[in-house]
Amino acid sequence: MFPAELLSAAEKLLEDCRIAGLKITTAESCSGGLIAGCLTEIAGSSDVVERGFVTYSNEAKMELLDVAESLLAAHGAVSAEVAEAMASGALAHSPADIAVAVTGVAGPGGGSDAKPVGLVYMGLCRRGEPPLHRKLNFPGSRGDVRQATVEAALDGLAALATPSTVQ
């Protein structure tokens, strides 16, 4: 289902989290659960993957992750501010230690000059620390954007698992 290189990255991430004693939660919009799906494709992942939230709609972001309606109105769902709020909300609603959140425009439609197809914001958060974000731009089809988002999310989680590397 997932390319070998993604599964290898997921396997390494899970092992690093086991060693560090960390649990993961995900909050996904544009990837629709693919990050959690990639992680749980690995046998034994249940000792690291605590839960995942698929919050495709703004209502889901507000109800499940406590993303403020005012934040969505001011910045839009595809924004650094919302990605950070999603990551923080995922941690607030789980006992996990690290969280990744993604929100973006996977395409083929829905893009604009300000927020083109392929734009993805990733929120990253480690319990007890302020969230941060990464702005990403991926070329290609909807599938390409979603797969690249999963790859970037695994990289972001790997950085959280070893905090000295988070940028």
Image (tube, helix red, strand yellow):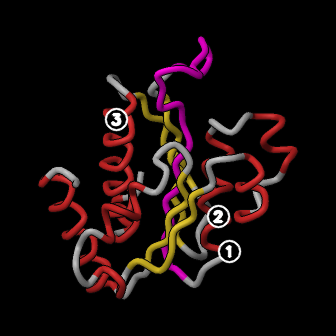
Residue under circle 1? 92
- The residue at which mark 3 appears reads as 143
Q: CA distance from mark 1 to mark 2?
A: 6 Å
- Residue lying farthest front? 1
Q: Which residue is mark 2?
A: 88
Q: Which residues are magenta?
A: 96-116
Tell me residue 9's x, y (percent): 20, 60
Q: Are marks 2 and 3 in contact (CB under 8 Å)?
A: no
The residue sitting at 56% across, 43% down in the picture is: 103
Q: Residue at x 36, y 63 (%)?
A: 37
Residue 11 appears at what percent x and percent y? 20, 70
**Residue 49 sits inside the magenta stretch:** no
Mark positioned earlier in the residue sequence (2 or 3): 2
Expressed as whole percent of the image width and height from the top left, the position of residue 158 reads: 32, 63
Q: Which residue sits furthest top?
A: 113
Q: Around disc 2, counting alpha carbons within 10 Å, would you say few (fewer than 14), some (14 to 19), or many (20 or more)?
A: many
Q: Separation of disc 3 and disc 1 at Cα?
A: 30 Å
Rendering quarter of residue 15: bottom left
Q: The residue under label 1 is which amino acid type?
A: Ala
Q: Residues within 10 Å of mark 3 (few under 14, many from 20)?
A: few
